[in-house]
Image (spheres, rainbow, N blue to C red):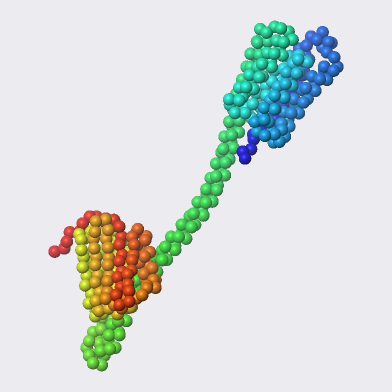
Amino acid sequence: MKSRPKLPASDRQGRLLLVFMVIAGFIVTFYTMSSQERSSLTIQEMVLGISFGVIYLLLALYSQVLFDRVPAGWAEALFFFVECSLVLGIGFVLGTGGIWLFVVPLSAFAVETLAPRRRWLVYGALFAIVVLSNGLPSGNWINALINGLTAGTAIFFVAVFAQLRLNEQQAREHVEQLMLELEKANVQLAAYATQAEELAMTQERNRLAREIHDNLGHYLTIVNVQIEAAKVVMDSDPGRALDAMNKAQELTKKGLTRVRESVAALRESPVSSRPLGEAIASLVKEAQSTGIVTEFQVTGEPQSLENKVALALYRAAQEGLTNVCRHARASRVDVLLDFQPGEVRLEIRDNGVGAAETTGGFGLLGIRERMQLLGGRAEISTGVGKGFCLTASVPMPYADGPVQPEE
């Protein structure tokens, strides 16, 4: 529920000014009376006129009580009706000498409490009070109209100054409200900055974890396969076993190099200086060294990809081939890099044992995260005896247009 505005008399200066206006009104009224008029006043009339003024003053000073207890709309109407009636009563009982001093505060009250259109009803009532209180007793309506116009000028200027005061008060309150909102916004901004920093740190940790897992897991898997192959043929074919061990050693060195690169803030990217197809071809060659028949095919018109897109697809190929070597027990794997209008798709399909369902290890989770960050998707299809098929795709990744095929 919207709170009602307080009347000007609610502050100390307003109260003092109102009391001064009422006292001055009585003084001017009695001063402008002729000695005959003063002598003709009865005690009852003087008490009644002064009582009207006291009630007028008390109602103005403590009007907030009325405004808080009476429903909106009725309180304003009741307040101005009673006050105008009291001023009219003072004019009829004591005379009209200082009646304009009683009228002026009501114009300020109208500015403080009423909507602009309703204020004119009060202004008209105040003008009518001055005219009637002067014209009815004397019958001189021309003089009454002149007095009404004089009082109307005072009403106008007081209303203007009251409006200026109200505007200044509202502007100050608006500024204070804006300051509070700005303070709250600063607090929220600080909280958002902290959350953004924590989110960035989390994303960077996840990125580092994916990079280390993809690199280290890939190379360790192939090294393990080479060592297993060397153990099998060590007695029957020492030369072949030695060759496998040499390959394992070479891959170990590469893996260590990749790990150092990852720990050193991952500044180097395996696709930063060569096309994606060439980078995936090197992974296929490494997979072929394990004895698995691996075929790689590029379809569509090769495109130059953004580094983050090429890196995501490279890591997907790396993880897919690592899983084939580690789990699939496959004799063949086919890798397809397909450039389509508005999308690039990577597919890795093997003829291994497959599975009833995928457990979704860390590597597959990393692939999904990479694809989702780029607005793409990663899907896995498998079945017992049907092998695995990993598909990763990213929409609209092209950066520099078609790449000219190499000779």
Q: Position of residue 254 (x, y in %)?
A: 29, 75
Q: Quadrant of residue 258?
A: bottom left
With respect to residue 189, does 125 lie above or below?
Answer: above
With respect to residue 108, does 193 lie above or below?
Answer: below
Q: Quadrant of the N terminus?
A: top right
> In this view of the protein, which residue sits in the foreground, 68 or 407?
68
Horizontal arrangement in the rendering, residue 291 relative to residue 191 (left or right): left
Q: Which residue does the image show at 30% across and 66% down from the upper left?
A: 391
Does residue 286 appear anywhere in the picture? no
> In this view of the protein, which residue sits in the foreground, 394 or 150?
394
Q: Quadrant of residue 319?
A: bottom left
Q: Position of residue 86 (x, y in %)?
A: 74, 21
Q: Position of residue 49 (x, y in %)?
A: 79, 19
Q: Quadrant of the C terminus?
A: bottom left
With respect to residue 376, does 158 lie above or below?
Answer: above
Q: Which residue does the image show at 84% across and 10% down from the upper left?
A: 39
Horizontal arrangement in the rendering, residue 254 relative to residue 205 (left or right): left
Q: Quadrant of residue 133?
A: top right
Q: Residue furthest left?
A: 407
Q: Position of residue 388 (x, y in %)?
A: 30, 73
Q: Which residue does the image show at 27% across and 74% down from the upper left?
A: 350
